[in-house]
């Protein structure tokens, strides 16, 4: 197996793990919310950790699934120009993917720099039960870095791998590849 193919499979496996982590995170957020409602309104005993955990899970859940959304082209796309001028689709698709690489890589680099600062300064969340901010913020870095790699993979002739059977690709006009 070629090293590039192996790296692409590793990247896809990490993305699939992020998809599962996000699914689990969403289920946990539902359970936490239900538990908070029950304990607060029926038992008159609010959970002091519920809001903290919910907000932390929200950050992890969103940014763990961003690479999957990029891989299956489930991101927002404005395709007015390609529909008005069909001959421009190829150029616009390459331009959009290149822009995706540049913007996502830049944001990942900025986020990584901030993660290092958060670690060095020992910055904690302002919650009832503080935890290091970088625990959640590192998922922002991961989400943007991995998305930059998917935009790059869409530009280069690297092996394309389909998501596993538990991951359902988004179908429809927004999956046209124009952006």
Image: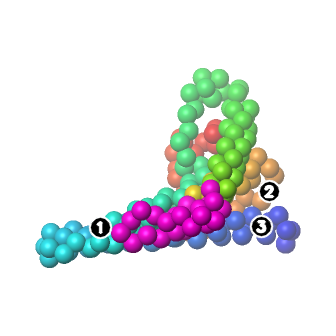
Q: Which residues are magenta?
A: 114-139
Instruction: Give the label, 2 or 1, closer to the camera.
Output: 1
Q: Residue at x 66, y 62 (%)?
A: 116
Q: Is residue 37 left or right of residue 162?
A: left
Q: Residue at x 73, y 38 (%)?
A: 94
Tell me the residue that label 3 is attached to: 7
Q: Residue at x 60, y 23 (%)?
A: 84
The answer to whether the residues at label 3 and label 2 have Cβ atoms under 8 Å apart is: no
Disc 2 residue crowd, few under 14, some 14–19, many 20+, Cα 10 Å: few
Tell me the residue that label 1 is attached to: 33
Q: Is residue 79 left or right of residue 46?
A: right
Tell me the residue that label 2 is attached to: 158
Q: How far across and down, in percent of the image, does residue 175 sit?
A: 57, 45
Q: Earlier in the sequence, mark 3 or mark 1?
A: 3
> Can residue 61 be seen at all in this image of the molecule?
no
Whether residue 88 is in magenta: the answer is no
Q: Earlier in the sequence, mark 2 or mark 1?
A: 1
């Amino acid at each position: 197996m070629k090293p590039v193919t192996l790296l692409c499979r590793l990247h896809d496996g990490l993305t699939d793990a992020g998809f599962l982590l996000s699914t689990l995170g969403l289920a946990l957020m539902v359970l936490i919310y239900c538990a908070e409602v029950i304990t607060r309104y029926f038992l008159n005993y609010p959970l002091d950790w519920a809001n903290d955990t919910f907000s932390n899970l929200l950050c992890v859940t969103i940014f763990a699934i961003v690479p999957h959304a990029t891989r299956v082209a489930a991101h927002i796309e404005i395709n007015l120009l390609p529909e008005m001028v069909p001959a421009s689709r190829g150029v616009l698709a390459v331009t959009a993917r290149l822009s995706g690489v540049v913007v996502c890589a830049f944001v990942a680099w900025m986020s990584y720099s901030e993660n290092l600062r958060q670690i060095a300064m020992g910055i904690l969340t302002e919650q009832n039960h503080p935890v290091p901010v970088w625990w959640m913020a590192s998922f922002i870095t991961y989400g943007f870095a991995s998305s930059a790699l998917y935009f790059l993979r869409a530009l280069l002739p690297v092996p394309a791998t389909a998501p596993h059977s538990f991951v359902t690709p988004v179908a429809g006009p927004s999956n046209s590849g124009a952006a």
